[in-house]
Amino acid sequence: ESDGTLMCSYHGWRFDGAGKVTALPQAKDEEFARMATNPRACAAARPAQVREGVLWAWGESSPDAALESALAEPNLPAELADPSLEGRAKCSIWSHRDVPYGWEVALENVTDPAHVDVSHHNIVANRYEDPCPIEIDLVRKPSNAGGFKFSAKHLRKRPAKKGDGGVVTFDFKPPCQMHIKTAYPNGTSLTLLINFVPTKPGWTRLVGSTMLVQNERGEKPPGFALYSAPLPRWLSHLMAPAFLHQDQVFLHFQQAILRKEELKTGKGWKQSYWMPTESDKGTVALRSWLVRNGGIDWHPACSTDLAAMPDKRLLFDTYRTHTAQCTSC
């Protein structure tokens, strides 16, 4: 509201930033002062920070939440806080989208470097020329709290193209973040900042951006001028689905097939997947991390029916999954 309070749209109660009730329209004036001191009249307050144009909320509201939140920085790339890169490291416009596949499938998708050359044909690769063996090396060993990080080296069989030669690293930061960085020989880099926030079984909210780092000569990563172009937010958002839609059907139906197989035969991912090449190491690392740390403990009232949508057109409903919730679009 204009006075900075949060108003409940059901009964009109208002709360300040600490969760204390400031207005209770149904109470008489002489009653309100007494009611306002009742802890049950207060809302749970979760600490929050605004960084790089994004609201980062702490996951719980215990008495120590404010202190714990103050001691924890949002997971943003170190380059954004590096004084030597001031003016050269910038995030592009942030975007969000509800995607029709769950948190586990979403994270698996972004730990799989091999699919990019095929699924994202004519946007970032050519499916007839670019698929190749990929060497995977662990940069940070998997841990429960620290996730893992690995590098991917593409052993291209075709002649070199502009943009080749970059070192790609995949940095998984639990529970829902992946940074995919391509560092180029000329000292520039481009990092995809991906956050997958689970919203309900089988659905995830993607909140993402790109970080571009210029070198000391002001050069940009080769082939990525579009990411640094001064596009209006609505135009940037309009272009985003072109990339997401390319593998959306695969991921949605893969999720449904895996769930059906699990319910029918009891098989888990190890039995359902066959991953014979080195390029699959990232997927194996993620699935192993999920086994150790468990999935999401959804409330019993949540439906866990992950059957595929009968009408594929619903998968591409950009209005429902983005536009209706975006003030720019």
Image (cartoon, helix red, strand yellow):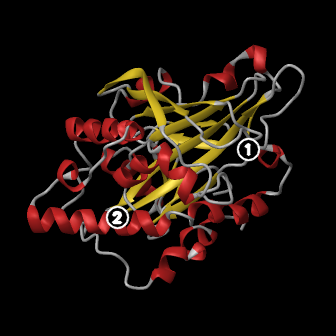
Q: Is residue 113 above or below residue 120?
A: above
Percent position (x, y) of residue 19? 45, 45
Give the labeled residue for mark 1. 92
Q: Is residue 199 visible?
A: yes
Query: Which quarter of the figure has residue 243?
Result: bottom right
Amino acid type shown at disc 2: Gln
Taking 238 as reference, is 309 left or right? left
The crowd level at tag 2 (other Cα within 10 Å; few <14, some 14-19, many 20+) is some
Percent position (x, y) of residue 55? 58, 43
* Residue nearer the viewer, 253 or 152: 152
Amino acid type shown at disc 1: Ser
**2 or 1: tag closer to the N-terminus:** 1
Q: Tag 1, which secondary structure?
A: loop
Percent position (x, y) of residue 34? 37, 49
Taking 55 as reference, is 102 left or right? left
The C terminus lies in quadrant = bottom right
What residue appears at the point 48 percent right and 57 percent down from the top-left corner? Answer: 205
